[in-house]
Amino acid sequence: MAGEATRGPSPRGAAVRKAVMLLLCLGVPTGRAYNVDTGSALLYQGPPDTLFGYSVVLHSHGDNRWLVVGAPTANWLANASVVNPGAIYRCRIGKNPGRTCEQLQLGSPTGDPCGKTCLEERDNQWLGVTLARQPGENGSIVTCGHRWKNIFYIKNENKLPTGVCYGMPSDLRTELSRRISPCYQGSISMCRART
Ligand SMILES: *[C@@H]1O[C@H](CO)[C@@H](O)[C@H](O)[C@H]1NC(C)=O
Ligand SMILES: *[C@@H]1O[C@H](CO)[C@@H](O)[C@H](O)[C@H]1NC(C)=O
């Protein structure tokens, strides 16, 4: 059968194998084995059905060390009527025998004005789907919800899923957090051009 004929070793296959061997000999970076210390692991648990742990960063500020954890389908304690908006949690490392975590409150419970032609829909926005920390001492933290939507044009049946991010300072004082939505309006064509 034709299918079987192509399975045999071909000169081309041999040449590819040689090229791969050569690349390996030339020191192409390869995987390295390492051990995960399961014996003294710290286990933190979040509310069920919230995808707690979807994103994680280690964070420190001064003497405090934290695990910051995203839970993109969590309920929001500050406004339970928003449907599964997602949240991030901070869990103290050390001096936390109960391994408890605390939900960080980002954004205003009543809603944030987002622009002249903007009306926000926070339901199912997946806040906490990504988390990043600036490197270095006291780096700030950014988290995003890629499914945040502008429903200003809902009359035309348009929802614009431009996403939203929040940046917060290293001390995790969320009242100082900053809402970031680079894809909204003025720069929307820029965001589209980049994709
Ligand atoms: C980091 O934060 C700690 C605690 O607030 C402060 O003492 C320290 O000076 C800060 N370091 C830098 C580089 O800002
Ligand atoms: C909660 O959020 C919903 C939807 O954004 C809003 O209509 C409502 O006013 C908010 N409730 C409170 C108590 O802030």
Image: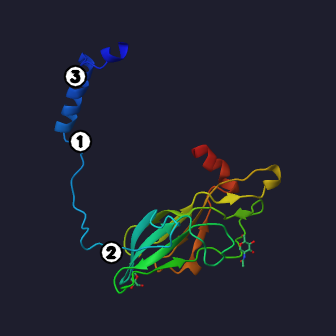
Q: Nearer the viewer, residue 1 or 190?
A: 1
Badge 2 element? loop
Residue at image point 34% right, 83% down: 94
Q: Which mark is residue 28?
A: 1
Amino acid tagged 1: Val
Amino acid tagged 3: Ala
Considering only vertical position in the picture, is 191 above or below 127?
above
Q: Across the whole image, how many numbered discs are drawn on residues?
A: 3
Q: Nearer the viewer, residue 107 or 8?
A: 8
Q: How would you rate the neighbour count of disc 1 (Cα within 10 Å): few for under 14, some for 14-19, many for 20 or more?
A: few
Badge 3 element? helix
Figure quadrant of residue 36: bottom left
Q: Quadrant of ligand 1?
A: bottom left
Residue at image point 70% right, 55% down: 185
* Mark 2 vs mark 1, CA separation in Å: 35 Å
Give whichever of discs 2 and 1 has the lower sequence position.
Answer: 1
Q: Is residue 148 visible?
A: yes
Q: Which residue is mark 2?
A: 42
Which is in the foreground here, disc 2 or disc 3?
A: 2
Q: Which residue is mark 3?
A: 14
Task: Determine whether the beta carbon of the residue marked 3 sits less than 8 angstroms from the nearest atom of ligand 1.
Answer: no
Residue at image point 26% right, 22% down: 13
Percent of width and height locating residue 151: 74, 58
